[in-house]
Amino acid sequence: EREVSLKSGKAVYAALNRERYDVTIYDPRNDLEVLTKRRAEIDLAFILLHGKFGEDGRVQGMLDILQIPFVGSGVLSSAMAMNKRIAKDVCRGVGLRVAEEVILKQGERFSVKRLIAKLGSPVVIKPVSEGSSIGISIAHDREEILEGIDKAFQYDAEVMAEEYLDGTEITCCVLGNQDLETLPVVEIVPDVAHTFFDYEAKYLPGATDEICPARIAPALAEEAASCAKKAHRALKCSVWSRSDMIIRDKTLYLLEINTLPGMTETSLFPLAARRAGMTLSDLLDRLIMCSLEQYGE
């Protein structure tokens, strides 16, 4: 997800208010040594690394060791949210509705017949720990299921097979520390070339329609906001998060929670913020202020 990370970084770098902030970009691929040497000069790091290493707690742990404060969730929250199995277990435990799933481990035997018997058809197959819908397939028969599992195992040693939920895809963004605020709910409508909100649909301009506020009943919008806050708290998120959901037959299901939402020109968090009356620069100010408050500064 390097390309997406670079796009997010570029957008944030351009939008940060230079009258308030002295901004330097560090690329972990090339600049870790420089970052380490300059750590005493850094008041706050804005992490914009999507996917593994960036969202799973590892870079957060590195910054903790270097004693560099950063925007967003810490090691534990990031690691839990990135692992779809753990995240679902935690959210299910606080009463949130999630899809049924079966966990497959590399090298272990499994029965496609039993999998279909439990989950129905089609089946969604995804790596347990990946972001941006990477490695996801929708499988309709035995052959497609086996192909999807093989594909997902290329990205992770654990794979989740999940019941397919057909409905209205939405997302709800959360801001704040103790007093959480939600932004207007966004409805996601992939075009005919995308059967779901996959990697290309997320980042290719024009690949989806994002409608904000979502065309859903006020009661469902309130439920989505409540669900997003509850998931944020259950996974011990900090400062910001984005929860993806689907509505099937007027019933809301939580799909996953993102502790490091995208900030590209097609990303959903900036869109929801604009609908709430915030420019990207305003949103960044809010995130930075919340982060400094969290560190007691």
Image: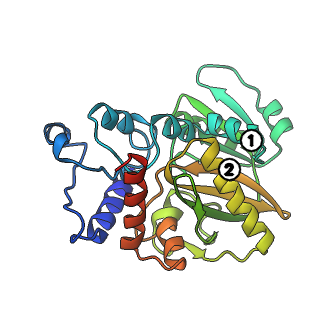
The structure residue drawn at horizontal position 50% and vertical position 80%, both measured from the top left corner, is: 277
Residue 208: image location, x then y, percent: 56, 72
Q: Which mark is residue 27?
A: none
Q: Which residue is mark 2?
A: 230
Q: Is residue 40 above or below residue 227?
A: above
Residue 149 is situated, as x and y percent measured from the top left of the image, at 62, 36
Answer left or right for 222 relative to 78: right
Please tell me which residue lies in front, 213 or 278: 278
| Front one among 200 and 130 | 130
Q: Are marks 1 and 2 in contact (CB under 8 Å)?
A: yes
Q: Nearer the viewer, residue 178 or 47?
A: 178
Q: Amino acid at mark 1?
A: Val
Q: Quadrant of residue 75?
A: top left
Q: Secondary structure at mark 1?
A: loop
Q: Quadrant of residue 80?
A: top right
SS for dot 2: helix
Horizontal relation, residue 72 to residue 99: left or right: left
Question: Which residue position holds label 1?
Answer: 94
User: 69 left or right of 113?
Assistant: left
Q: CA distance from mark 1 to mark 2?
A: 8 Å
**Residue 217 on image: x %, y %:** 79, 74
